[in-house]
Every structure is written in structure tokens, then in C-alpha cells.
Amino acid sequence: MGDFLMPSLGADMESGTVLEWRVRPGDTVHRGDIVAVVDTEKSTIEIEVFEDGIVDELLVEAGAEVPVGTPLARIGAATAQPAEAARPKPARPKARPRPAHRKAAPSNAARPQAAEHVRASPLARRRAAERDIDLAAVGGSGPGGAVVAADLERAAVTGPPAPTPAAEAAPEPAAARRDDRQAAMRHAIGVLMARSAREIPHYHLATTIDLSAALRWLTAANERRSVSERLLPGALLLRATALAAREVPALNGFWVDDGFRPSAVVHLGVAVSLRGGGLVAPALHDADRLTLDELMAGLRDLVGRARAGRLRSSEMADPTLTVTNLGDQGVDEVHGVIYAPQVALIGFGKVAERPWASGGMLGVRPTVRATLAADHRASDGMIGARFLNALDRLLQTPEDL
Amino acid sequence: MNLAETRALLARLLHGIAPEVDLDTIDPAAPLQEEAELDSMDFLNLVNALYDETGIEIPERDYPRVATIDGFVDYVSALSTA
């Protein structure tokens, strides 16, 4: 083991703010443990450690904003060796989930200057809202005077401390403070999508899929289930997508250094729209190996945590193929922009009854429009068509999903 | 539960799912899911929260009957006093 770095939680991330540490020097950690909570432009993320070990030293204090790749903590080997022996080369460690793809990342100069608003971490905002605390009245101890969760705890105990000059100078209306966060998220989405649109030669395919069999099966299945075990059509669509991704691996992976790197696993990115605007697309890990029930439970958990601002670092960093389902928004189809460095994006529109010609007869069936946006550097239309056809076929035998 | 109590319960459950939604600003006869911008996952969570709280289980085939505030309140109120 060695230095534990500020991870890259998506191609659009340049830096992160350590909101709180969940471990102290001397603590034993295991792979997957949450060691810190980090705030990014888009979300508050729980950072997991990737190897077993013992926390040697915390290198960054809570409240500090540091660039991706900055050592956050030193973590020694799990075995009870003396710390000196365990101290590794200070070289770039492997604690990093995945090399950051930051070639086209903009310089810090391009970031919006949000200092005129009361700055606060999402966690602090949420807690402040829960307790009806006015953020402007709480002195921030975070970077740039940002209010962090710890400030609220202090405020709750001692009453509001003397405001910092920054906070004093900026008594903003509440609406403006919400806008601050949203502006940051728009910026982050904008940077990533602009890069995708600029660099990725997209091609788009669409197909209409008959869902009568799938929905009939689903209705019958849900009749037998308790509320907490009910399935949503979206879970069926995700399951079929995951299986199709395994079948057509040329769409599942990353475009890195002028080449396609297929992924051996299927981590489906699930685009989740957030209340109040913006979206995140965290990963449902190993979606192709989950049973339908596991996938549904995972989806519920993921959407819930995405909206509560409680995602984990591994979920932010490693989706291999993203799905956007705009069915609930009532549109027929979505032609998406790929999340670089991924090479494809699957879109679903609403499930609706539509005229359907089959066997010389015209009937009405529930159908969904499935779309594929794919990177022409990594695949051609024939591959894309194979994927959509596989998706269609899989959805015709829902009992096998 | 009478109608007012059921409505208060709905407001509370909804607050846990969509905190920014104010039930009083929504037309009680309009589709709740659209008005409150609830997606199918939110709606399932609402039905689930109702079950956890009251033991009342709304089957999917009855979803159309609880699609508005009025419909929801009438349905749940009738079941809870039955």
C-alpha cells in the first residue's frame, strides 16, 4: 500500500474537497471501507479504500480542496509490520481506482467563480435544510469560507460564530444559494458533454421494441410480490441491457489513448436525474451478474443514494456503459451524448401503446424506443445494430432475464 | 383514518421522497406523479412507505385509482377505516 490519493470520480472532476474523515491514524481498513467523504462539483461522494491496510497518517485536513491525484492519507500494509517497513515508495500508488482521463480537462481558470454566494458543501446544505439553519449565519471554515458539516455541528452547540468577512459580504437570498450548487453542476456536466461532443464521432441507431411479453410477465410477477419486492419495467430494461453488453462487448469499455479497451465486467452507469436539476450517472456494479431481484434492489439503493448525495467513489469512477431512461419524462426517444471515456450510451423512452404491424395484422402493443449512441472510433453501425437486436431478443423472453 | 388524517399522512410520506413538494400547491384532482415530478421509482417508494407505515398494500392494478391526491386519500382512507 502507500499513499491514498484523491481519486478521479469521473472524467469531469479536477479537484475535490475532503469534508470529513471516517478513519483515524491507527485504524485498520479493509477494501471497500469508506474512509472519507469528498465533495465534488456534482455530488458528495463516500470514498472507499481499495486495499486492506492500516491508516498511518492523514495528509489532508477536513475542509481542504485538493486536485485529483493528491495524496490524502498514508496507508500501511495490513500485516502488523513496523510502520517503517511498510512505508512504500512514494511513487504513484495503486490506490487509484482508474487512471484519470483528464487530457482535455480545462484549467482552473475556466471554473466559475462562485465566491459571491455563500459556499457550502452539499452535506452542510442538506443538514442545514433539515434543521432549518440559515447557512449565511454560519461561519464557514472550509475552503473559501465554505460552510462544511462540522461548522453546523459547532453552530448547533455554540450558536452562530462570528461570520467570516466573505460570508458577511454576501448575505444572499436562499434561492441564489441553491443556484450556486446548480451552477456548479451545470458547469461540470457542460465540460464533460462539450468534450464528448467535440471528441467523439457519434453515430445513432434506434429501434422499437415490443414489450407485451415483458410487461405481461412483469404484471404477473408483481401480483405475487410484496410492495418492497416489486419490479419496475426499468429494471427489466437494465437487465436486458447488461446481458446485451456482455454479448456485444465492443460497446462496453473505454476509449483510452487512441484505442478501445473492452471491459471484462459490465458496470452499468444509470443516469439519475436529481430533484432540482442536474444528473449523475453512477455505476450499478456487475449488472450482468445480478439476478433481476438483485438488480432491482441495487437500482433502488443507487437512485436513493444518488438523490440523497451519498454515492461511493467506486460508483462514480467506473461505469463501463451508461443507460439513460427518460420514459418517466414522457418522451418517445432520447438521442444521448456519450460519457467519455465510455464508447456507448443506451437510451429508453416511454413505454406506450403504439400501433404495431405483425403477421399482416395491425394491432396495438406496449412498446419502447431503444436508442444507441455509439463512438464510431470504437465500433460501426453493424455492431450497434447487433446490440439493439440482442436487446430486443432478450426482452421477448422476460422469464429468462 | 379520516380524510384529513390521510392527507396529512400523504404529505408526510411525500416529504420523505420529494422534500420540496408542497401538497397544498397541487391540484388535488390532477395527476400527482406529473405535478410532483415523481418518477416510477419515487411512486413505488411512496407506495412502499405507505405499506411500512400502515400495512396498506396498494396493488399495481389499483395505481390508476390513486393517481391523484383525491384518489389516493379516498382509497387509503376507505381501506384504513374498513
Image: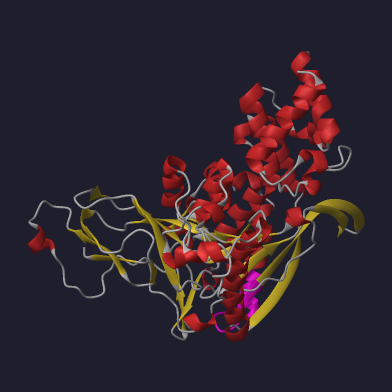
Q: Residue furthest top?
A: B82
Vertical order, A359 against A185 (above or below): above
Q: Is residue A105 visible?
A: no
For the residue pair A129 and A25, the one nearer the viewer reads as: A129
Is residue A50 left or right of A366 when viewed as pictured?
left
Q: Is residue A383 magenta?
A: yes
- The stretch in magenta equals A373-386
Q: Residue at x 56, y 58 (%)?
A: A242
x%, y% of residue B22?
A: 75, 42
x%, y% of residue A161?
A: 45, 51
For the residue pair A63 and A93, the one nearer the viewer reads as: A63
Q: Is residue B14 visible?
A: yes
Q: Residue at x 46, y 48 (%)?
A: A152
Q: Residue at x 54, y 47 (%)?
A: A128
Quadrant of the rendering where the N terminus of chain A is positioned: bottom left
Q: Residue at x 77, y 19 (%)?
A: B79
**In which quarter of the view is residue A42 placed?**
bottom right
Is residue A124 left or right of B55 when viewed as pictured?
left
x%, y% of residue A102?
A: 45, 79
x%, y% of residue A150?
A: 41, 50
